[in-house]
Image (cartoon, grey):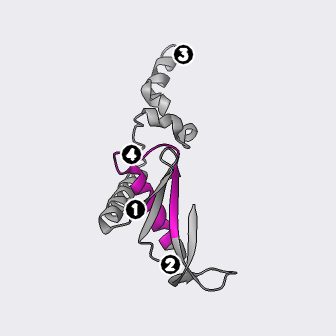
Amino acid sequence: MVEFYRCEEGIPLQGYAGKYCVVPVEYKRGHPKRDQTDILQLAAQAMCLEEMLCCEIPCGYLFYGETRRREKVELTEEVRDTVRSMFSEMHGYFSRKYTPKVKWSKSCNACSLRDICLPILGKGKSASRYVEEHMDGED
């Protein structure tokens, strides 16, 4: 979700008087993670909004359903550099036409991309091995 607050140093929004600050809010069903995945996702969203809206977004919020609390996240240069590095890695994969293997975990069950990613397939044979096995008997 993106919230817009009236503020002097903000951006104009078409159809609305005044200027507005942009604040991304990422809603999560569970509880805060021990790693930085949620923070990096929020930072990536903020960086996209900055590019789209020509503004700077210094912070955002993570809301966790289990705790029913918002956590403020400062979008530091360190966090942004980590996101840029991940973007660079992703672009490298794309240019090489390489798809990394999926590492299935319990969290895959709650992921909105589960039906696209199909992590359960990573637990079985590779596609090439499957084809090889089934082509051997056809002559």
Q: Is residue 61 above or below residue 33?
A: below
Question: What is the CA distance from the residue labelled 4 to the residue labelled 2?
Answer: 30 Å
Q: Nearer the viewer, mark 4 or mark 2?
A: 4
Question: What is the CA distance from the residue labelled 2 to the residue labelled 1?
Answer: 20 Å
Q: Which mark is residue 139?
A: none
Q: Which residues are magenta?
A: 23-50
Q: Which mark is residue 33?
A: 4
Residue 62 horizontal side relative to residue 34, left or right: right
Image point (44%, 76%), residue name: 56
Of marks 4 and 3, which one's residue comes earlier in the chain?
4
Label 3: which secondary element: loop
Q: Amino acid at mark 4?
A: Lys
Pick whichever, 96 or 23, lies toward us. Answer: 23
Q: Which mark is residue 54?
A: 2
Label 4: which secondary element: loop
Of marks 2 and 3, which one's residue comes earlier in the chain?
2
